[in-house]
Image (cartoon, rainbow, N blue to C red):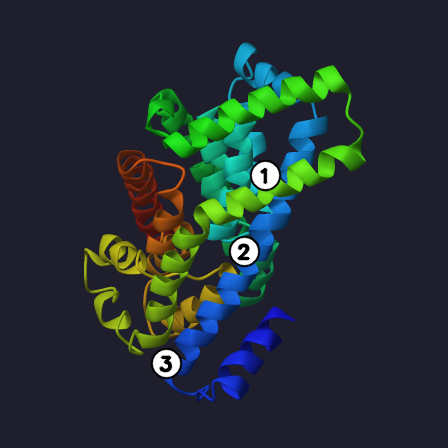
Amino acid sequence: MIQRFADWLVYDIFGLDASTALGEAINFFFYDTIKILILLFFISVIMGVINAYFPIERLRNYLTSRKLYGLQYFLAALFGAITPFCSCSSIPLFIGFVKGGIPLGVTFAYLITSPLVNEVAVAMFIGTFGVRITVIYVISGILLGMIGGFILGKMKLEPYLSDWVKQIQQHSSSDSDVWKKENTPFIKRLPIITQEAWGIVKGVLLYIIIGIGIGAFMHGYVPEGFFEQYMSKDNWFAVPFSVILAVPMYANAAGIVPIIEVFVAKGIPIGTAIAFMMAVVGLSLPEATLLKKVMTWKLIGIFFGLVTLFIVILGYLYNVIL
């Protein structure tokens, strides 16, 4: 429905041509903006309900007070793998986890894995590359989230969360105490939960518009064949260079897997192509723009730098074993 509305608005009302770069970019902008705003609002409401009713402090205490030997990172990465979100769409849940006091490393494990591994990516990978490559990709994606989350968690990066998130955490704690004391029925809690969700949407609205605007420009105006010339097997630096080239892009698995299939068909090594895909869906300027609302630039740089390093390593490994 959102895609049909975007098509109607851009092509019928605005009169833009679907075959032009401008038409494609504007269509992408309206579709993704509407989709992410709706998703952000409803996920924020759901997380508000969970924070109001679910004993989140018990989960937080369980994750922080017990020796789980890495199980918490596996569970977070696994949850990321089963949620069908792109990098930008994963951020509302990231906010909810941080708001609930879930350890930051565990939250990062989810944020890393969610856009990389989901049922859309798995289904398309099986149809495109077969079961063996799909299994290797899924396992490595989950391991990337687990290891990345573990390392980031050990770095004690909580001070580099934004002041906005810290205020949300404080407000959430006070609200939790109110719910406990008043035993407020759901029908009375819902307006407050909805108001808080709308406040989160308004808080990140400008970042969403800027981020998706960047993605829309890249989506519509990057010339065909631009990337292939730098990603051939003759270039030893093709893997890191493909990851760098991918960062300005923005797409989900459904949009990028067909492009990867074309890359491989044209002779680009599969590891290089998959590294490019992982960087597109897991690292992007739009994602960085959205994360600026919840993190300082230093934390974003650490997060992007570590994930980029792991993706490059995986790209070289894929080229060896696949």
Left or right: residue 291 compared with residue 223 = right
Q: Amino acid at mark 3?
A: Leu
Q: Amino acid at mark 2?
A: Leu
Q: Is residue 97 above or below residue 318?
A: above
Can residue 129 be seen in this snapshot? no
**Foreground: 89 or 278?**
89
Q: Position of residue 190 (x, y in %)?
A: 72, 38
Q: Circle 1 sits in a helix, a strand or a loop, which is it? A: helix
The circle on residue 22 is: 3
- Contact between labelled residues 3 and 2, with CB atoms less than 8 Å apart: no
The circle on residue 188 is: none
Q: Position of residue 124 (x, y in %)?
A: 56, 63
Q: Earlier in the sequence, mark 2 or mark 3?
A: 3
Assess disc 2: are there few (<14), some (14-19) or many (≥20) residues with their C-alpha within 10 Å of its C-alpha: some
Task: Say which residue appears at 77% left-offset and 25% top-offset.
Answer: 184
Q: How many marks?
A: 3
Task: Say which residue appears at 49% left-offset and 50% top-offset.
Answer: 115
Residue located beneath label 2 in the image: 37
Q: Position of residue 165 (x, y in %)?
A: 44, 32
Q: Position of residue 174 (x, y in %)?
A: 58, 20
In which quadrant is the N terminus drawn?
bottom right
Q: Circle 2 sits in a helix, a strand or a loop, which is it? A: helix
Residue located beneath label 1 in the image: 196
**Foreground: 176 or 79?**
176
Task: Say which residue appears at 50% left-offset and 37% top-offset.
Answer: 95
Q: Circle 3 sits in a helix, a strand or a loop, which is it? A: helix
Can residue 144 be seen in this snapshot? yes
- In which image quadrant can residue 180 be found? top right
Q: Amino acid at mark 1?
A: Glu
